[in-house]
Image: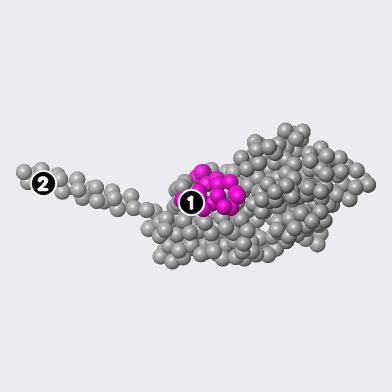
């Protein structure tokens, strides 16, 4: 009987040890203090909202507060350089788009960071669709009609850009389309989508390549006309709007990946255990129905299905692909913007 009791004790003790070892990794890896999530954007808008939804969900999952810190300016250079220099302990991460970790280092040689030396991918959290649109009074109803105006040297076709077009996926879509098909459109740079939308609605600019967020209500009301989506398939919110391939521009779709993403990255020397912990937490919280309900208000497309290693590889592929596209179409920053 004593032997049996001893065996039972050893089994119970072993199970207890296994339970301790199986405890959440964050209890071992993260200190008991807040995580700072740095955003290279101003408050407000769908990207800021998506970050807040994520931060609110991550805090209980990781067992520490997640605090949003806005560091806008210089197309994200300020935020990226600050995070690159931060302690690599998992308590400073950056919530950013491909502009900061792909376009900027490819185009702006004054940045004080190297993407793959100074950062590591945690999670590609969300993606978004690029939509070519015009205002209702333009009379343009198809992409081919837009291109005809862009190719007509007697037409003053104006594009509403979100910031410097070379640095954003939406602006790059315009530049590639304009160059690929010998267009004559000129860009006006706006500090964001909202002010550009106001001028588009008023007819002061001809067209834009915008995301669904901030545009859907105007498209549904008929004030804006969605001409095509630069996506592999039609999107559920605009089922009648053709893809660029269906609109007659398959060459455009092969020039680059036109489904941009927003991601969470960390300083490069952040331990793999911490990176994987945060990645798993993002993956887990984003699968809940409560989270999906809150996220739906952003108008973005939820991703967050890959491991940190898989998303790191996707980031590298995106970097190499855009580098080839920029070279092919000779897209560079103006000298005063470098």
Q: Magenta residues?
A: 290-307
Q: Residue lying farthest left?
A: 1
Q: Residue lying farthest front?
A: 221
In this rendering, does residue 26 appear at all?
yes
Query: Which disc is residue 291 wearing?
Result: 1
Q: Residue lying farthest right?
A: 154
Q: Tell me which residue sits at (72%, 33%) in the image.
A: 246
Q: Along the line of sight, which residue is nearer the eye, 228 or 41?
A: 228
Q: Position of residue 187 (x, y in %)?
A: 81, 54
Residues packed near mark 2 inside 10 Å, few (<14), some (14 to 19) or many (20 plus): few
Q: Along the line of sight, which residue is nearer the eye, 248 or 30?
A: 248
Residues packed near mark 1 inside 10 Å, few (<14), some (14 to 19) or many (20 plus): some
Q: Tell me which residue sits at (70%, 39%) in the image.
A: 241
Secondary structure under tag 2 reads helix
Is there a contact, CB below 8 Å, between mark 2 and mark 1? no
Query: Which disc is residue 5 wearing?
Result: 2
Q: Tell me which residue sits at (45%, 48%) in the image.
A: 288
- Which label lies toward us, 2 or 1? 1
Secondary structure under tag 1 reads helix
Q: Tell me which residue sits at (70%, 45%) in the image.
A: 131
Instruction: Say above or below: 95 vs 148.
Output: below
Q: Along the line of sight, which residue is nearer the eye, 66 or 269?
A: 66
Q: Position of residue 58 (x, y in %)?
A: 46, 56
Residue 296 lies in the magenta-colored region: yes
Instruction: Say above or below: 69 vs 289.
Output: below
Residue 98 lies in the magenta-colored region: no
Q: CA distance from mark 2 to mark 1?
A: 47 Å
Q: Position of residue 168 (x, y in %)?
A: 71, 52
In this rendering, does residue 84 appear at all?
no
Quarter holding residue 226: top right
Q: Quadrant of the C terminus?
A: bottom right
Query: Which disc is residue 190 wearing?
Result: none
């Amino acid at each position: 009987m004593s032997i049996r009791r001893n065996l039972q004790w050893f089994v119970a003790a072993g199970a207890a040890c296994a339970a301790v070892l199986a405890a959440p990794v964050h209890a071992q890896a993260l200190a008991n203090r807040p995580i700072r999530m740095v955003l290279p954007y101003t408050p407000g808008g769908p990207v800021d909202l998506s970050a807040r939804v994520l931060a609110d969900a991550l805090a209980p999952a990781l067992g520490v507060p997640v605090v949003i810190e806005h560091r806008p300016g210089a197309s994200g250079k300020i935020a990226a350089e600050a995070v690159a220099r931060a302690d690599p302990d998992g308590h400073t991460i950056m919530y950013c788009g491909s502009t900061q970790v792909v376009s900027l280092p490819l185009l702006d040689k004054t940045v004080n960071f190297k993407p793959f030396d100074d950062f590591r991918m945690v999670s590609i959290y969300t993606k978004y669709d690029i939509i070519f649109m015009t205002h209702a009074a333009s009379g343009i109803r198809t992409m081919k009609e837009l291109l005809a105006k862009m190719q007509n040297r007697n037409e003053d076709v104006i594009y509403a850009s979100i910031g410097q077009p070379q640095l954003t996926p939406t602006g790059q879509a315009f530049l590639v389309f304009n160059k690929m098909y010998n267009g004559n459109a000129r860009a006006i740079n706006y500090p964001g989508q909202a002010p550009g939308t106001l001028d588009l609605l008023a007819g002061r600019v001809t067209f834009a390549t915008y995301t669904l967020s901030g545009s859907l209500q105007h498209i549904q009301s008929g004030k804006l006309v969605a001409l095509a989506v630069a996506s592999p398939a039609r999107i559920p919110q605009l089922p009648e709007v053709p893809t660029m391939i269906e609109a007659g521009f398959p060459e455009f779709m092969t020039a680059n990946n036109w489904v941009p993403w927003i991601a969470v990255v960390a300083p490069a020397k952040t331990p793999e255990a911490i990176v994987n912990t945060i990645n798993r937490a993002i993956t887990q919280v984003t699968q809940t129905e409560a989270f999906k309900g809150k996220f739906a208000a952003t108008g973005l497309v939820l991703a967050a299905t890959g491991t940190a290693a898989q998303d790191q590889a996707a980031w590298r592929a995106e970097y190499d692909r855009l580098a080839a596209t920029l070279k092919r179409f000779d897209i560079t920053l103006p000298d005063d913007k470098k």
